[in-house]
Image (spheres, grey):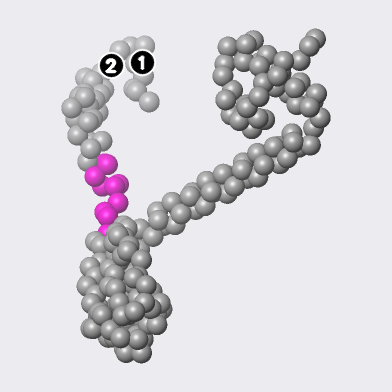
């Protein structure tokens, strides 16, 4: 709150204090920028991942040794194997061509992945290797996945509702169907709108009902 002027006016000391407490726009902007720099979190450093397999092309029944190394990671997980040391090797014996993805996670949640494919002769090719995932925080990744799950759930619910509505429509008499089409047409004309989804849901024909 600004300093209030008393009835007798400012004293010289009051004026000096007011001037010392008044910021120019440039000073205020600089202070805000400095505060933002102090408040802004420092992003974590992503771990690095290196992974290889020897051999990476083998006959059925043979084994392959997967070797990996990381920097900046505190935990690691190898797909089709489970939790592993952040640096190490393991022997695998896949029965079909398989991708092995190592996920390295730092103490602050920053994560990085790397993938190697072990091909088994005479078996179907492994799926394309997934793109490496880099994440500053697992929390943001989890949040995005939760949002996608919610969107998928909503879409599933809407699809179910539409299917139920269509089934109810199909059970109606032809006369009742005609009234529904006429109501849709009337709404389009009265409010000057187009309702193609309604026509799709309730059939392409739009018969007229005699009033």
Tell me the element at label 2: loop
Residue 14 figure quarter: top left
Q: In screen coordinates, is 3 left or right of 160? A: left
Q: Is residue 55 above or below residue 189?
A: below
Total marks placed:
2
Q: Name the secondary structure under disc 1.
A: loop
- Which quadrant: the N terminus? top left
139 vs 119, nearest the viewer:
119
Residue located at (25% from left, 66% from top): 47
Of the numbered discs in the image, which one, if any, rests on residue 201?
A: none
Percent position (x, y) of residue 196?
Answer: 57, 25
User: 10 Å neighbourhood of mark 1: few (<14), some, or many (≥20)?
Assistant: few
Q: Is residue 167 left or right of residue 10?
A: right
Residue 158 image position (x, y, % from top left): 62, 41
Residue 96 in picture, x, y percent from top left: 38, 78
Start and end of the magenta stretch? Answer: 35-44
- Whether the magenta-drawn stretch holds residue 63 is answered as no
Q: Which residue: 26% across, 80% down?
A: 57
Residue annotated with mark 1: 6
**Residue beneath the point at 30% across and 86% down:** 59
Contact, CB < 8 Å: mark 2 with mark 1? yes
In this image, 114 relative to 210: left or right? left
**What is the crowding at mark 2: few (fewer than 14 residues within 10 Å), some, or many (at least 20)?**
few
Whole-percent x and y of residue 197? Answer: 58, 29
Q: Is residue 7 visible?
A: yes
Residue 36 is covered by the magenta coloring = yes
Instruction: Identify the residue under disc 2.
Output: 10
Query: Residue 96 or 114: which is nearer the viewer?
Result: 96
Residue 27 lies in quadrant: top left
In the image, residue 68 sits, relative to residue 63, either above or below, namely above
| Whether residue 70 can be seen here | no
Q: Is residue 136 above or below residue 185?
A: below
């Amino acid at each position: 709150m600004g300093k209030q002027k008393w009835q007798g006016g400012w004293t010289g000391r009051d004026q000096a204090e007011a001037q010392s407490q008044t910021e120019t726009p440039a000073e205020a902007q600089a202070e805000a920028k400095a505060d933002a720099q102090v408040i802004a979190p420092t992003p974590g450093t992503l771990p690095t991942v290196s992974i290889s397999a020897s051999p990476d092309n083998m006959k059925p029944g043979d084994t392959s040794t997967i070797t990996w190394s990381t920097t900046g990671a505190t935990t690691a997980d190898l797909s089709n194997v489970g939790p592993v040391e952040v640096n190490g090797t393991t022997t695998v014996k896949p029965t079909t061509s398989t991708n092995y993805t190592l996920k390295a996670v730092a103490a602050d949640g920053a994560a990085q992945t790397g993938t190697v494919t072990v091909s088994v002769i005479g078996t179907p090719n492994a799926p394309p290797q997934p793109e490496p995932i880099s994440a500053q925080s697992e929390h943001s990744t989890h949040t995005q996945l939760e949002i996608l799950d919610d969107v998928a759930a909503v879409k599933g619910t809407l699809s179910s509702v539409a299917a139920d509505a269509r089934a109810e429509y199909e059970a109606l008499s032809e006369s009742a169907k005609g009234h529904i089409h006429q109501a849709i047409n009337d709404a389009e004309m009265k409010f000057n709108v187009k309702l193609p989804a309604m026509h799709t849901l309730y059939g392409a024909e739009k018969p007229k009902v005699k009033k």
